[in-house]
Amino acid sequence: MGTGEYEYSKLNYEQKAHKVAIPPPQPFIKSLKNTVKETFFPDDPLRQFKNQSPCRKLVLGVQYVFPIFEWGSRYNLSFFKSDVIAGITIASLAIPQGISYAKLANLPPILGLYSSFIPPLVYAMMGSSKDLAVGTVAVASLLTGSMLGAVVNANENPTVYLHLAFMATFFAGVLQASLGILRLGFIVDFLSHATIVGFMGGAATVVCLQQLKGILGLEHFTHGTDLVSVLRSVFTQTHQSTKRPKLFWISAMAPLTSVILGSLLVYLTHAEKHGVQVIGELKKGLNPITIMDLSFGSQYLSTAIKTGIVTGVIALANYNIDGNKEMIAFGMMNIAGSCTSCYLTTGPFSRSAVNFNAGCKTAVSNIVMAIAVMITLLFLTPLFHYTPLVVLSSIIISAMLGLINYEEAIHLWSLDKFDFVVCMSAYLGVVFGSVALSLLRVLLFVARPKTVALGHIPDSTIYRSMDQYQNAKTVPGILILQIDAPIYFANSSYLRERYTVGNIDTSGITMLGEVKKVMERRGLKLVLANPGGEVIKKLNKGKLIEVIGQEWIYLTVGEAVGACNFMLHTYKNDEKLTSTGSSSGKETWNDNNV
Protein backbone atom coordinates (compact mmCIF):
# COMPACT_ATOMS: atom_id res chain seq x y z
CA MET A 1 0.00 0.00 0.00
CA GLY A 2 2.78 2.44 0.76
CA THR A 3 4.28 4.19 3.80
CA GLY A 4 3.34 6.95 6.21
CA GLU A 5 -0.27 8.06 6.35
CA TYR A 6 -1.31 5.61 3.59
CA GLU A 7 -0.42 2.51 5.62
CA TYR A 8 -3.32 0.59 6.99
CA SER A 9 -3.31 -1.16 10.36
CA LYS A 10 -5.96 -3.60 11.56
CA LEU A 11 -5.15 -2.58 15.14
CA ASN A 12 -5.84 1.11 14.40
CA TYR A 13 -9.07 0.14 12.67
CA GLU A 14 -10.28 -1.85 15.68
CA GLN A 15 -9.30 0.91 18.10
CA LYS A 16 -10.99 3.72 16.16
CA ALA A 17 -14.33 3.37 14.36
CA HIS A 18 -15.22 5.93 11.73
CA LYS A 19 -18.87 6.93 11.90
CA VAL A 20 -20.92 8.35 9.05
CA ALA A 21 -20.67 12.08 9.33
CA ILE A 22 -23.51 14.50 8.78
CA PRO A 23 -22.44 17.25 6.39
CA PRO A 24 -22.21 20.63 8.09
CA PRO A 25 -25.16 22.93 7.27
CA GLN A 26 -24.63 25.55 4.59
CA PRO A 27 -26.43 28.89 4.15
CA PHE A 28 -29.17 28.75 1.55
CA ILE A 29 -27.52 31.39 -0.64
CA LYS A 30 -24.23 29.48 -0.72
CA SER A 31 -26.01 26.22 -1.47
CA LEU A 32 -28.03 27.86 -4.25
CA LYS A 33 -24.90 29.45 -5.69
CA ASN A 34 -23.10 26.10 -5.78
CA THR A 35 -26.09 24.41 -7.41
CA VAL A 36 -26.40 27.08 -10.08
CA LYS A 37 -22.68 26.96 -10.79
CA GLU A 38 -22.66 23.16 -11.03
CA THR A 39 -25.70 23.12 -13.33
CA PHE A 40 -25.11 26.07 -15.63
CA PHE A 41 -21.41 26.96 -15.32
CA PRO A 42 -19.48 23.69 -14.93
CA ASP A 43 -16.81 24.98 -17.31
CA ASP A 44 -16.40 28.23 -15.31
CA PRO A 45 -16.37 30.53 -18.38
CA LEU A 46 -15.45 33.60 -16.33
CA ARG A 47 -12.27 32.15 -14.82
CA GLN A 48 -10.07 33.88 -17.40
CA PHE A 49 -11.35 37.30 -16.26
CA LYS A 50 -10.32 36.83 -12.64
CA ASN A 51 -7.59 39.15 -11.30
CA GLN A 52 -7.34 41.01 -14.62
CA SER A 53 -7.25 44.76 -15.23
CA PRO A 54 -10.34 46.43 -16.77
CA CYS A 55 -8.51 46.92 -20.06
CA ARG A 56 -7.44 43.28 -20.16
CA LYS A 57 -10.98 42.16 -19.30
CA LEU A 58 -12.28 44.14 -22.28
CA VAL A 59 -9.78 42.47 -24.60
CA LEU A 60 -10.59 39.03 -23.22
CA GLY A 61 -14.31 39.76 -23.58
CA VAL A 62 -13.96 40.68 -27.24
CA GLN A 63 -11.84 37.57 -27.86
CA TYR A 64 -14.41 35.40 -26.09
CA VAL A 65 -17.27 36.65 -28.25
CA PHE A 66 -15.18 36.84 -31.42
CA PRO A 67 -12.43 34.16 -31.19
CA ILE A 68 -11.00 35.32 -34.53
CA PHE A 69 -9.33 38.18 -32.62
CA GLU A 70 -7.66 35.65 -30.35
CA TRP A 71 -6.14 33.29 -32.93
CA GLY A 72 -5.86 35.88 -35.69
CA SER A 73 -2.73 37.39 -34.15
CA ARG A 74 -0.96 34.04 -34.53
CA TYR A 75 -2.07 33.47 -38.11
CA ASN A 76 0.67 32.94 -40.68
CA LEU A 77 1.23 32.19 -44.37
CA SER A 78 1.55 28.45 -43.78
CA PHE A 79 -1.90 28.37 -42.18
CA PHE A 80 -3.29 30.45 -45.04
CA LYS A 81 -2.05 28.03 -47.71
CA SER A 82 -3.68 25.09 -45.92
CA ASP A 83 -6.92 26.99 -45.35
CA VAL A 84 -7.15 28.04 -49.00
CA ILE A 85 -6.86 24.43 -50.15
CA ALA A 86 -9.41 23.27 -47.60
CA GLY A 87 -11.76 26.17 -48.38
CA ILE A 88 -11.75 25.50 -52.12
CA THR A 89 -12.30 21.80 -51.42
CA ILE A 90 -15.37 22.30 -49.25
CA ALA A 91 -16.68 24.97 -51.65
CA SER A 92 -16.67 22.39 -54.45
CA LEU A 93 -18.85 20.26 -52.20
CA ALA A 94 -20.98 23.08 -50.77
CA ILE A 95 -22.12 24.50 -54.11
CA PRO A 96 -23.79 21.38 -55.58
CA GLN A 97 -25.02 20.21 -52.18
CA GLY A 98 -26.43 23.64 -51.37
CA ILE A 99 -28.45 23.69 -54.58
CA SER A 100 -29.61 20.11 -53.99
CA TYR A 101 -30.66 20.60 -50.36
CA ALA A 102 -32.58 23.78 -51.16
CA LYS A 103 -34.70 21.76 -53.60
CA LEU A 104 -35.22 19.22 -50.82
CA ALA A 105 -36.67 22.01 -48.67
CA ASN A 106 -38.94 23.10 -51.59
CA LEU A 107 -37.00 26.37 -51.78
CA PRO A 108 -35.45 28.08 -54.82
CA PRO A 109 -32.04 26.48 -55.56
CA ILE A 110 -30.29 29.84 -55.30
CA LEU A 111 -31.02 29.87 -51.54
CA GLY A 112 -28.62 26.97 -51.15
CA LEU A 113 -25.84 29.20 -52.46
CA TYR A 114 -26.97 32.18 -50.39
CA SER A 115 -26.83 29.94 -47.29
CA SER A 116 -23.21 29.02 -48.05
CA PHE A 117 -22.11 32.65 -48.20
CA ILE A 118 -23.22 34.74 -45.20
CA PRO A 119 -23.43 32.10 -42.40
CA PRO A 120 -19.85 30.82 -42.88
CA LEU A 121 -18.56 34.39 -42.54
CA VAL A 122 -20.46 34.85 -39.27
CA TYR A 123 -19.22 31.55 -37.91
CA ALA A 124 -15.63 32.32 -38.88
CA MET A 125 -15.77 35.33 -36.55
CA MET A 126 -17.73 33.79 -33.66
CA GLY A 127 -17.05 30.05 -33.83
CA SER A 128 -14.34 28.29 -31.87
CA SER A 129 -13.88 25.15 -34.00
CA LYS A 130 -11.12 25.21 -36.59
CA ASP A 131 -12.41 22.31 -38.71
CA LEU A 132 -16.18 22.85 -38.68
CA ALA A 133 -17.51 23.66 -42.16
CA VAL A 134 -20.78 25.58 -42.27
CA GLY A 135 -23.59 24.78 -44.66
CA THR A 136 -27.07 23.38 -45.17
CA VAL A 137 -27.91 19.76 -44.37
CA ALA A 138 -30.33 17.33 -45.95
CA VAL A 139 -32.13 16.26 -42.75
CA ALA A 140 -32.96 19.80 -41.64
CA SER A 141 -33.91 20.69 -45.22
CA LEU A 142 -36.30 17.75 -45.37
CA LEU A 143 -37.89 18.69 -42.04
CA THR A 144 -38.26 22.30 -43.19
CA GLY A 145 -40.00 21.23 -46.38
CA SER A 146 -42.22 18.74 -44.56
CA MET A 147 -43.34 20.97 -41.68
CA LEU A 148 -43.86 24.14 -43.72
CA GLY A 149 -45.37 22.23 -46.63
CA ALA A 150 -48.07 20.90 -44.32
CA VAL A 151 -49.64 24.37 -44.06
CA VAL A 152 -48.46 26.22 -47.19
CA ASN A 153 -48.00 24.84 -50.69
CA ALA A 154 -44.64 26.02 -52.04
CA ASN A 155 -45.90 25.93 -55.64
CA GLU A 156 -49.17 27.76 -55.04
CA ASN A 157 -47.88 30.36 -52.55
CA PRO A 158 -44.11 30.60 -53.13
CA THR A 159 -43.72 34.02 -51.49
CA VAL A 160 -45.55 33.04 -48.30
CA TYR A 161 -43.62 29.77 -48.15
CA LEU A 162 -40.30 31.58 -48.62
CA HIS A 163 -41.07 34.06 -45.86
CA LEU A 164 -42.02 31.18 -43.55
CA ALA A 165 -38.67 29.53 -44.23
CA PHE A 166 -36.87 32.73 -43.22
CA MET A 167 -39.03 32.96 -40.09
CA ALA A 168 -38.28 29.36 -39.15
CA THR A 169 -34.56 30.03 -39.60
CA PHE A 170 -34.83 33.12 -37.41
CA PHE A 171 -36.54 31.20 -34.60
CA ALA A 172 -34.03 28.35 -34.92
CA GLY A 173 -31.26 30.89 -34.44
CA VAL A 174 -32.99 32.50 -31.47
CA LEU A 175 -33.41 29.07 -29.86
CA GLN A 176 -29.77 28.11 -30.42
CA ALA A 177 -28.39 31.43 -29.18
CA SER A 178 -30.72 31.36 -26.16
CA LEU A 179 -29.59 27.87 -25.19
CA GLY A 180 -26.01 29.10 -25.28
CA ILE A 181 -26.56 32.40 -23.49
CA LEU A 182 -28.72 30.83 -20.77
CA ARG A 183 -26.25 27.94 -20.38
CA LEU A 184 -28.89 25.38 -21.33
CA GLY A 185 -26.82 23.53 -23.88
CA PHE A 186 -27.05 20.35 -21.81
CA ILE A 187 -30.63 19.94 -23.07
CA VAL A 188 -29.23 18.68 -26.37
CA ASP A 189 -27.39 15.96 -24.42
CA PHE A 190 -30.76 14.23 -23.91
CA LEU A 191 -30.51 13.07 -27.52
CA SER A 192 -28.63 9.83 -26.91
CA HIS A 193 -26.03 8.40 -29.25
CA ALA A 194 -28.39 5.53 -30.07
CA THR A 195 -31.26 7.92 -30.78
CA ILE A 196 -29.13 10.07 -33.09
CA VAL A 197 -27.84 7.02 -34.99
CA GLY A 198 -31.41 5.77 -35.48
CA PHE A 199 -32.87 9.19 -36.31
CA MET A 200 -30.17 10.04 -38.84
CA GLY A 201 -30.48 6.63 -40.46
CA GLY A 202 -34.26 6.96 -40.68
CA ALA A 203 -34.05 10.49 -42.02
CA ALA A 204 -31.47 9.40 -44.59
CA THR A 205 -33.78 6.61 -45.74
CA VAL A 206 -36.68 9.02 -46.15
CA VAL A 207 -34.50 11.54 -47.99
CA CYS A 208 -33.34 8.84 -50.41
CA LEU A 209 -36.95 7.80 -51.03
CA GLN A 210 -37.88 11.42 -51.70
CA GLN A 211 -35.32 11.50 -54.51
CA LEU A 212 -37.41 9.01 -56.49
CA LYS A 213 -39.25 12.09 -57.72
CA GLY A 214 -36.16 13.39 -59.50
CA ILE A 215 -34.82 10.02 -60.60
CA LEU A 216 -38.15 8.82 -62.03
CA GLY A 217 -39.11 12.24 -63.35
CA LEU A 218 -42.42 12.41 -61.45
CA GLU A 219 -44.20 15.77 -61.63
CA HIS A 220 -46.49 15.29 -58.63
CA PHE A 221 -44.99 13.98 -55.42
CA THR A 222 -45.96 13.86 -51.77
CA HIS A 223 -44.63 16.36 -49.25
CA GLY A 224 -44.96 13.68 -46.57
CA THR A 225 -41.83 12.19 -45.06
CA ASP A 226 -43.12 8.74 -44.15
CA LEU A 227 -42.56 5.56 -46.14
CA VAL A 228 -46.24 4.93 -46.90
CA SER A 229 -46.83 8.37 -48.45
CA VAL A 230 -43.70 8.12 -50.60
CA LEU A 231 -44.52 4.66 -51.94
CA ARG A 232 -48.11 5.72 -52.63
CA SER A 233 -46.83 8.62 -54.75
CA VAL A 234 -44.54 6.29 -56.72
CA PHE A 235 -47.04 3.53 -57.45
CA THR A 236 -49.94 5.86 -58.29
CA GLN A 237 -47.83 7.43 -61.05
CA THR A 238 -46.35 4.34 -62.67
CA HIS A 239 -47.80 5.47 -66.00
CA GLN A 240 -45.52 8.54 -65.83
CA SER A 241 -42.36 6.79 -64.71
CA THR A 242 -42.60 4.09 -67.39
CA LYS A 243 -42.99 6.51 -70.29
CA ARG A 244 -39.43 7.73 -70.38
CA PRO A 245 -38.22 10.23 -72.99
CA LYS A 246 -35.70 8.90 -75.49
CA LEU A 247 -32.85 10.90 -73.99
CA PHE A 248 -33.65 10.06 -70.34
CA TRP A 249 -30.53 7.86 -70.17
CA ILE A 250 -28.38 10.96 -70.48
CA SER A 251 -29.50 12.42 -67.17
CA ALA A 252 -30.10 9.06 -65.48
CA MET A 253 -26.47 8.00 -66.04
CA ALA A 254 -24.98 11.36 -65.12
CA PRO A 255 -22.17 10.85 -62.56
CA LEU A 256 -23.31 11.29 -58.99
CA THR A 257 -20.89 14.03 -58.17
CA SER A 258 -20.49 15.73 -61.52
CA VAL A 259 -22.81 18.69 -61.94
CA ILE A 260 -20.56 20.04 -64.65
CA LEU A 261 -20.65 16.90 -66.75
CA GLY A 262 -24.40 16.54 -66.32
CA SER A 263 -24.98 20.15 -67.34
CA LEU A 264 -22.66 19.81 -70.33
CA LEU A 265 -24.44 16.70 -71.59
CA VAL A 266 -27.85 18.34 -71.31
CA TYR A 267 -26.61 21.48 -73.04
CA LEU A 268 -25.00 19.63 -75.95
CA THR A 269 -27.95 17.30 -76.53
CA HIS A 270 -30.77 19.75 -75.68
CA ALA A 271 -32.11 17.05 -73.38
CA GLU A 272 -34.27 19.60 -71.56
CA LYS A 273 -36.49 19.68 -74.66
CA HIS A 274 -36.97 15.92 -74.43
CA GLY A 275 -38.30 15.60 -70.89
CA VAL A 276 -35.15 15.89 -68.79
CA GLN A 277 -35.89 18.24 -65.90
CA VAL A 278 -33.23 20.90 -65.21
CA ILE A 279 -32.71 23.58 -62.59
CA GLY A 280 -33.41 26.48 -64.90
CA GLU A 281 -32.37 30.07 -64.41
CA LEU A 282 -30.48 31.03 -61.24
CA LYS A 283 -30.50 34.72 -60.41
CA LYS A 284 -27.07 36.36 -60.42
CA GLY A 285 -26.02 38.58 -57.53
CA LEU A 286 -25.42 38.47 -53.79
CA ASN A 287 -27.94 37.78 -51.04
CA PRO A 288 -30.92 40.15 -51.02
CA ILE A 289 -31.77 41.60 -47.60
CA THR A 290 -34.86 39.88 -46.20
CA ILE A 291 -35.21 41.36 -42.72
CA MET A 292 -38.48 42.99 -43.78
CA ASP A 293 -39.81 39.61 -44.88
CA LEU A 294 -39.89 38.35 -41.28
CA SER A 295 -43.64 38.58 -40.78
CA PHE A 296 -44.21 38.18 -37.05
CA GLY A 297 -47.90 38.89 -37.52
CA SER A 298 -48.38 36.03 -39.96
CA GLN A 299 -51.21 33.55 -39.41
CA TYR A 300 -48.58 30.81 -39.78
CA LEU A 301 -46.38 32.15 -36.99
CA SER A 302 -46.89 29.09 -34.78
CA THR A 303 -45.79 26.80 -37.64
CA ALA A 304 -42.65 28.86 -38.16
CA ILE A 305 -41.83 28.67 -34.44
CA LYS A 306 -42.37 24.90 -34.28
CA THR A 307 -40.30 24.35 -37.41
CA GLY A 308 -37.54 26.55 -36.04
CA ILE A 309 -37.42 24.69 -32.72
CA VAL A 310 -37.35 21.22 -34.31
CA THR A 311 -34.81 22.04 -37.01
CA GLY A 312 -32.72 24.11 -34.61
CA VAL A 313 -32.31 21.20 -32.19
CA ILE A 314 -31.64 18.73 -35.02
CA ALA A 315 -29.00 21.11 -36.40
CA LEU A 316 -27.21 21.08 -33.03
CA ALA A 317 -27.39 17.28 -32.85
CA ASN A 318 -25.95 16.99 -36.37
CA TYR A 319 -22.48 17.86 -35.16
CA ASN A 320 -20.66 17.40 -31.85
CA ILE A 321 -21.18 20.94 -30.61
CA ASP A 322 -18.52 22.11 -28.17
CA GLY A 323 -20.55 23.71 -25.42
CA ASN A 324 -22.72 26.77 -25.01
CA LYS A 325 -20.30 29.09 -26.78
CA GLU A 326 -20.70 27.23 -30.07
CA MET A 327 -24.47 27.34 -29.72
CA ILE A 328 -24.31 31.13 -29.55
CA ALA A 329 -22.25 31.18 -32.75
CA PHE A 330 -24.70 28.86 -34.50
CA GLY A 331 -27.63 30.93 -33.33
CA MET A 332 -26.15 34.23 -34.48
CA MET A 333 -25.24 32.89 -37.92
CA ASN A 334 -28.82 31.65 -38.41
CA ILE A 335 -30.32 34.93 -37.20
CA ALA A 336 -28.04 36.80 -39.60
CA GLY A 337 -28.89 34.27 -42.31
CA SER A 338 -32.64 34.76 -41.91
CA CYS A 339 -32.11 38.45 -42.64
CA THR A 340 -30.05 37.77 -45.77
CA SER A 341 -32.05 35.22 -47.80
CA CYS A 342 -30.63 32.14 -46.08
CA TYR A 343 -32.34 29.16 -44.53
CA LEU A 344 -31.11 26.92 -41.71
CA THR A 345 -27.37 26.16 -41.66
CA THR A 346 -25.25 24.13 -39.28
CA GLY A 347 -21.95 22.25 -39.22
CA PRO A 348 -22.63 19.06 -41.20
CA PHE A 349 -20.35 16.24 -40.10
CA SER A 350 -19.55 15.02 -43.62
CA ARG A 351 -18.46 18.45 -44.85
CA SER A 352 -16.52 19.13 -41.65
CA ALA A 353 -14.73 15.81 -42.09
CA VAL A 354 -13.76 16.85 -45.63
CA ASN A 355 -12.54 20.19 -44.27
CA PHE A 356 -10.42 18.42 -41.66
CA ASN A 357 -9.00 15.89 -44.11
CA ALA A 358 -8.18 18.69 -46.54
CA GLY A 359 -5.82 20.09 -43.91
CA CYS A 360 -7.64 23.17 -42.61
CA LYS A 361 -5.85 25.05 -39.84
CA THR A 362 -8.40 27.67 -38.80
CA ALA A 363 -11.90 28.95 -39.54
CA VAL A 364 -10.42 30.91 -42.46
CA SER A 365 -11.33 27.88 -44.58
CA ASN A 366 -14.96 28.95 -44.13
CA ILE A 367 -14.07 32.44 -45.33
CA VAL A 368 -12.37 30.98 -48.43
CA MET A 369 -15.45 28.87 -49.10
CA ALA A 370 -17.69 31.92 -48.74
CA ILE A 371 -15.54 33.87 -51.20
CA ALA A 372 -15.74 30.99 -53.70
CA VAL A 373 -19.53 30.95 -53.33
CA MET A 374 -19.61 34.75 -53.72
CA ILE A 375 -17.72 34.48 -57.03
CA THR A 376 -20.19 31.82 -58.12
CA LEU A 377 -23.15 34.04 -57.23
CA LEU A 378 -21.70 37.01 -59.10
CA PHE A 379 -20.48 35.32 -62.27
CA LEU A 380 -21.13 31.58 -62.54
CA THR A 381 -24.82 30.96 -61.77
CA PRO A 382 -25.85 30.85 -65.46
CA LEU A 383 -23.69 27.74 -65.83
CA PHE A 384 -26.12 25.80 -63.62
CA HIS A 385 -29.11 26.41 -65.90
CA TYR A 386 -28.80 23.02 -67.59
CA THR A 387 -28.00 20.99 -64.48
CA PRO A 388 -30.40 17.99 -64.51
CA LEU A 389 -32.42 17.41 -61.37
CA VAL A 390 -31.46 13.75 -61.42
CA VAL A 391 -27.87 14.81 -60.66
CA LEU A 392 -29.08 16.76 -57.64
CA SER A 393 -31.05 13.72 -56.48
CA SER A 394 -27.98 11.55 -56.92
CA ILE A 395 -25.87 14.00 -54.91
CA ILE A 396 -28.38 13.86 -52.07
CA ILE A 397 -28.58 10.07 -52.11
CA SER A 398 -24.79 9.81 -52.14
CA ALA A 399 -24.55 12.04 -49.07
CA MET A 400 -27.41 10.28 -47.27
CA LEU A 401 -26.08 6.75 -47.65
CA GLY A 402 -23.23 7.69 -45.35
CA LEU A 403 -25.72 8.52 -42.58
CA ILE A 404 -27.20 5.02 -42.54
CA ASN A 405 -24.70 3.65 -40.05
CA TYR A 406 -25.66 -0.02 -39.92
CA GLU A 407 -22.27 -0.97 -38.47
CA GLU A 408 -22.95 1.23 -35.43
CA ALA A 409 -26.39 -0.38 -35.05
CA ILE A 410 -24.74 -3.82 -34.99
CA HIS A 411 -22.25 -2.52 -32.43
CA LEU A 412 -25.12 -1.24 -30.27
CA TRP A 413 -26.73 -4.70 -30.40
CA SER A 414 -23.57 -6.38 -29.14
CA LEU A 415 -22.90 -3.72 -26.50
CA ASP A 416 -26.33 -2.78 -25.12
CA LYS A 417 -29.61 -4.30 -26.30
CA PHE A 418 -31.66 -1.45 -24.86
CA ASP A 419 -29.63 1.12 -26.77
CA PHE A 420 -30.25 -0.93 -29.91
CA VAL A 421 -34.01 -0.85 -29.25
CA VAL A 422 -33.84 2.93 -28.82
CA CYS A 423 -31.88 3.21 -32.08
CA MET A 424 -34.38 1.12 -34.03
CA SER A 425 -37.32 2.95 -32.44
CA ALA A 426 -35.89 6.22 -33.67
CA TYR A 427 -35.24 4.77 -37.14
CA LEU A 428 -38.69 3.24 -37.56
CA GLY A 429 -40.33 6.25 -35.96
CA VAL A 430 -38.85 8.56 -38.59
CA VAL A 431 -39.53 6.22 -41.51
CA PHE A 432 -43.14 5.64 -40.51
CA GLY A 433 -43.91 9.13 -39.29
CA SER A 434 -43.48 9.18 -35.49
CA VAL A 435 -40.44 9.70 -33.27
CA ALA A 436 -42.11 9.53 -29.84
CA LEU A 437 -40.59 6.14 -28.92
CA SER A 438 -37.06 7.40 -29.41
CA LEU A 439 -37.47 9.88 -26.54
CA LEU A 440 -38.50 7.27 -23.94
CA ARG A 441 -35.08 6.80 -22.42
CA VAL A 442 -34.68 10.51 -21.77
CA LEU A 443 -37.10 10.23 -18.84
CA LEU A 444 -35.00 7.60 -17.07
CA PHE A 445 -31.75 9.41 -16.35
CA VAL A 446 -30.42 12.77 -15.20
CA ALA A 447 -28.07 15.07 -17.05
CA ARG A 448 -26.28 16.68 -14.13
CA PRO A 449 -25.13 14.17 -11.48
CA LYS A 450 -23.41 15.40 -8.36
CA THR A 451 -19.61 15.30 -8.43
CA VAL A 452 -17.53 15.00 -5.24
CA ALA A 453 -13.81 14.91 -4.55
CA LEU A 454 -12.70 12.17 -2.17
CA GLY A 455 -10.09 12.56 0.53
CA HIS A 456 -8.17 10.19 2.79
CA ILE A 457 -9.49 9.61 6.29
CA PRO A 458 -6.43 9.71 8.60
CA ASP A 459 -5.27 6.43 10.17
CA SER A 460 -7.26 4.34 7.68
CA THR A 461 -7.49 3.29 4.06
CA ILE A 462 -10.96 4.87 3.76
CA TYR A 463 -11.69 7.59 1.21
CA ARG A 464 -14.79 9.72 1.58
CA SER A 465 -16.27 13.00 0.39
CA MET A 466 -14.22 15.95 1.53
CA ASP A 467 -17.41 18.02 1.80
CA GLN A 468 -18.98 15.51 4.16
CA TYR A 469 -15.89 14.56 6.21
CA GLN A 470 -14.03 17.64 7.33
CA ASN A 471 -10.98 15.65 8.45
CA ALA A 472 -10.50 14.01 5.04
CA LYS A 473 -7.17 14.95 3.47
CA THR A 474 -6.18 15.33 -0.16
CA VAL A 475 -3.62 12.88 -1.52
CA PRO A 476 -0.64 14.73 -3.00
CA GLY A 477 -0.41 14.28 -6.76
CA ILE A 478 -3.68 12.33 -7.02
CA LEU A 479 -7.22 13.54 -7.72
CA ILE A 480 -10.00 11.12 -6.71
CA LEU A 481 -13.45 11.84 -8.14
CA GLN A 482 -16.79 10.16 -7.54
CA ILE A 483 -20.07 10.91 -9.30
CA ASP A 484 -23.24 9.57 -7.74
CA ALA A 485 -24.82 8.46 -11.01
CA PRO A 486 -24.24 6.19 -14.00
CA ILE A 487 -22.69 7.51 -17.21
CA TYR A 488 -25.42 7.79 -19.82
CA PHE A 489 -26.08 9.80 -22.96
CA ALA A 490 -27.68 12.63 -20.99
CA ASN A 491 -24.57 13.30 -18.92
CA SER A 492 -21.67 11.86 -20.96
CA SER A 493 -20.63 15.26 -22.36
CA TYR A 494 -20.78 16.79 -18.89
CA LEU A 495 -18.74 13.97 -17.38
CA ARG A 496 -15.85 14.47 -19.78
CA GLU A 497 -14.59 16.79 -17.06
CA ARG A 498 -16.21 15.21 -13.98
CA TYR A 499 -15.62 11.49 -14.04
CA THR A 500 -16.80 8.08 -12.47
CA VAL A 501 -19.54 5.46 -12.84
CA GLY A 502 -22.19 3.16 -11.40
CA ASN A 503 -23.43 2.04 -14.82
CA ILE A 504 -22.52 3.00 -18.36
CA ASP A 505 -24.10 3.00 -21.83
CA THR A 506 -22.62 3.38 -25.32
CA SER A 507 -22.35 7.17 -25.04
CA GLY A 508 -20.44 6.70 -21.78
CA ILE A 509 -18.12 4.13 -23.38
CA THR A 510 -17.31 6.61 -26.14
CA MET A 511 -16.78 9.43 -23.63
CA LEU A 512 -14.46 7.31 -21.49
CA GLY A 513 -12.26 6.57 -24.48
CA GLU A 514 -12.13 10.29 -25.34
CA VAL A 515 -11.20 11.19 -21.76
CA LYS A 516 -8.38 8.63 -21.82
CA LYS A 517 -6.91 10.24 -24.96
CA VAL A 518 -7.20 13.77 -23.54
CA MET A 519 -5.53 12.75 -20.28
CA GLU A 520 -2.67 11.04 -22.10
CA ARG A 521 -2.00 14.25 -24.03
CA ARG A 522 -1.81 16.08 -20.69
CA GLY A 523 0.57 13.53 -19.21
CA LEU A 524 -2.02 12.07 -16.82
CA LYS A 525 -2.89 8.47 -16.04
CA LEU A 526 -6.51 7.31 -15.83
CA VAL A 527 -7.12 4.78 -13.05
CA LEU A 528 -10.43 3.03 -12.29
CA ALA A 529 -11.43 1.84 -8.82
CA ASN A 530 -14.23 -0.56 -7.90
CA PRO A 531 -16.08 -0.74 -11.23
CA GLY A 532 -19.36 -2.66 -10.98
CA GLY A 533 -20.27 -5.80 -12.84
CA GLU A 534 -22.26 -4.07 -15.61
CA VAL A 535 -19.53 -1.48 -16.02
CA ILE A 536 -16.65 -3.91 -16.36
CA LYS A 537 -18.71 -6.08 -18.72
CA LYS A 538 -19.40 -3.20 -21.09
CA LEU A 539 -15.85 -1.91 -20.81
CA ASN A 540 -14.70 -5.35 -21.90
CA LYS A 541 -17.16 -5.52 -24.82
CA GLY A 542 -16.21 -2.03 -25.89
CA LYS A 543 -12.48 -2.91 -25.82
CA LEU A 544 -11.90 -0.15 -23.24
CA ILE A 545 -10.06 -2.45 -20.84
CA GLU A 546 -7.34 -2.85 -23.45
CA VAL A 547 -7.21 0.92 -23.91
CA ILE A 548 -7.07 1.75 -20.20
CA GLY A 549 -4.88 -1.23 -19.31
CA GLN A 550 -5.83 -4.09 -17.00
CA GLU A 551 -3.06 -3.01 -14.63
CA TRP A 552 -4.84 0.31 -13.99
CA ILE A 553 -8.16 -1.11 -12.78
CA TYR A 554 -8.32 -1.79 -9.02
CA LEU A 555 -10.75 -3.34 -6.60
CA THR A 556 -10.60 -0.54 -4.05
CA VAL A 557 -9.72 3.13 -3.96
CA GLY A 558 -7.00 2.37 -1.42
CA GLU A 559 -5.26 -0.04 -3.77
CA ALA A 560 -5.54 2.45 -6.65
CA VAL A 561 -4.10 5.28 -4.55
CA GLY A 562 -1.30 3.02 -3.33
CA ALA A 563 -0.34 2.11 -6.89
CA CYS A 564 -0.49 5.73 -8.03
CA ASN A 565 1.50 6.89 -5.01
CA PHE A 566 4.12 4.22 -5.68
CA MET A 567 4.42 5.23 -9.33
CA LEU A 568 4.65 8.93 -8.47
CA HIS A 569 7.54 8.31 -6.11
CA THR A 570 9.24 5.74 -8.33
CA TYR A 571 9.23 7.82 -11.47
CA LYS A 572 9.52 11.21 -9.84
CA ASN A 573 12.81 11.96 -11.55
CA ASP A 574 11.83 10.41 -14.89
CA GLU A 575 8.40 11.84 -15.58
CA LYS A 576 6.65 15.07 -14.73
CA LEU A 577 2.87 14.75 -14.78
CA THR A 578 0.76 17.89 -15.07
CA SER A 579 -2.90 18.20 -14.24
CA THR A 580 -5.40 20.97 -14.95
CA GLY A 581 -4.18 24.00 -13.04
CA SER A 582 -0.81 23.51 -11.34
CA SER A 583 -0.97 20.11 -9.58
CA SER A 584 0.55 16.94 -10.98
CA GLY A 585 -0.40 13.30 -10.65
CA LYS A 586 -3.16 10.81 -11.46
CA GLU A 587 -6.89 10.89 -11.95
CA THR A 588 -8.61 8.10 -10.00
CA TRP A 589 -12.24 7.26 -10.68
CA ASN A 590 -14.22 5.65 -7.92
CA ASP A 591 -17.61 3.97 -7.78
CA ASN A 592 -18.94 3.19 -4.33
CA ASN A 593 -22.52 2.73 -5.49
CA VAL A 594 -22.27 -0.76 -7.01
Image (tube, helix red, strand yellow):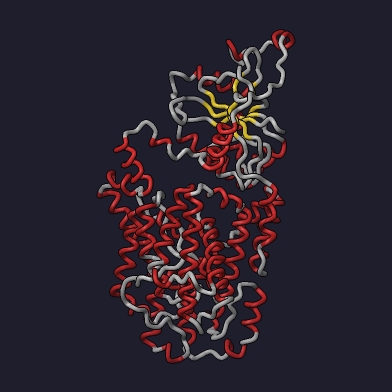
Q: Is residue 75 left or right of residue 485?
A: left
Q: With respect to residue 83, does 388 lie above or below?
A: below
Instruction: Tell which residue pokes out farthest to the right in this image.
Output: 14
Q: Position of residue 524 (x, y in %)?
A: 49, 30
Q: Who's the residue at 58% across and 44% down the image?
A: 492
Residue 413 in view here: no
Q: Indicate left or right for 269 with 150 as reference.
A: left
Q: Quadrant of residue 368?
A: bottom left
Quadrant (top left, top right, bottom left, bottom right) of the N terminus: top right
Q: Nearer the viewer, residue 50 or 86?
A: 50
Residue drawn 36% across the image and 55% down it: 124
Near-viewer residue (29 or 229): 29
Vertical side of 58 occupied by 16: above or below = above
Quarter of the image holding residue 10?
top right
Figure quadrant of residue 231: bottom right
Which residue is more in the foreground, 428 or 111? 111
Percent across and percent down for residue 55 are: 29, 38
In the rendered image, the residue lying farthest to the left is 77
Q: Is residue 103 visible?
A: yes
Q: In the picture shown, does residue 505 fall above or below 208? A: above
Residue 446 percent location from the top left of the image: 65, 44
Looking at the image, how many numbered discs can be counted on the residues? 0
Front position in the image: 250 or 62: 62
Q: Quadrant of the C terminus?
A: top right
Name the spot of residue 480 as percent of width and height, x first: 58, 27
User: Residue sitting at 61 percent across and 45 percent down?
Assistant: 447
Which residue does the image show at 51% across and 47% down from the upper left?
Answer: 183
